[in-house]
Amino acid sequence: MNVVIFGASGMVGQGVLRECLLDPEVKRVVTVGRTSSGQQHPKVRDLVHADLFDLTALEPELTGLDGCFFCLGVSAAGMSEGAYSRVTYDLTISVAEMLLRLSPGMTFLYVSGAGTDSTERGRTMWARVKGRTENALLRMPFKAAYMFRPAGIRPLHGIRSKTKLYQTFYTLLRPVLPLMTRLFPSFMTTTEQLGRAMLNVVKRGERSRVIEAAEINKL
């Protein structure tokens, strides 16, 4: 199985990348981002590219893929809806359209978030934009597309968040995160469980195309 990860240097992307490297069924992993994934491994082709809206130069590396793990994302704090839409909706759909042309038989997995608004009409800006992005992806003729909506994520194996505020939160709660993960399995998951769940969906599929937090640990 050959896969691509967008955002492999982020917390979720790091988790997915780790599980891909451990899985013997995954033969090749292409990582694409504005910064390096930091992984040196025989399976990995690490592509650093400044303009993710124009991936023309990378097209030869993005053919013949079985799955895409789209883990790019930014916090909406302090952003206008237009600016947030540009980096959330516009970029995601631009990448998806290109991958659909190059690898139409792939499965596309998008990391969204708990509380995403599928109606696109709610009061919360980020939830509307994420919902619009999900809906657009679900209409695209991939082999399959799945929207993952994790809630609380406990980073494992030295994985850290690139967002300072989030990493401060994880550092402060580190002593109680293992307990929270056990007590609230319908809310909390780990980077390891999330990565494995996403791999399992690419391999075997799943009936539900929108996968909420409670389903991730089951998968």
Image (cartoon, rainbow, N blue to C red):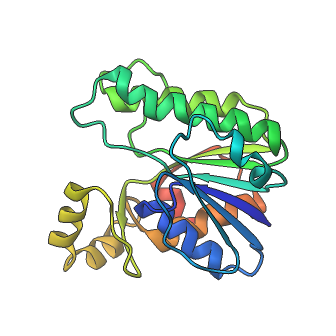
In the image, taking residue 144 as reference, residue 128 lies left or right, namely left
Residue at x 79% of width, y 33% of height: 141
Q: Quadrant of the C terminus?
A: bottom right
x and y percentages locating residue 211 in the rendered image? 56, 49
Residue 166 shows in this picture: yes
Q: Is residue 41 left or right of residue 126?
A: right
Residue located farthest toward the left when viewing the structure as drawn:
172
The residue under the point 36% across, 26% down is 83
Task: Pick the residue in front: 5 or 116.
Answer: 5
Q: How many marks?
A: 0
| Farthest top residue in view | 121
Quadrant of image for the N terminus: bottom right
Rendered position, 73 above or below 195: above
In the image, is 166 to the left or to the right of 95?
Answer: left
The image quarter containing residue 196 is bottom right
Identified at 48% across, 51% down, the residue is 34
Q: Is residue 219 visible?
A: no
Q: Which residue is at the front of the view, 31 or 135?
A: 31
x, y (%) of residue 107?
74, 49
* Residue at figure coordinates x 37%, y 29% from the top left: 84
Residue 194 at what x, y percent from top left?
A: 51, 65
Expressed as whole percent of the image width and height from the top left, the position of residue 108 reads: 68, 47
Q: Looking at the picture, tell me which residue is in the foreground, 47 or 170.
A: 47
- Give the image quarter of residue 136: top right
Q: Is residue 147 above or below residue 219?
A: above
Task: Tell me which corner region of the image, top left, top right, bottom left or bottom right, holds residue 57.
Answer: top right
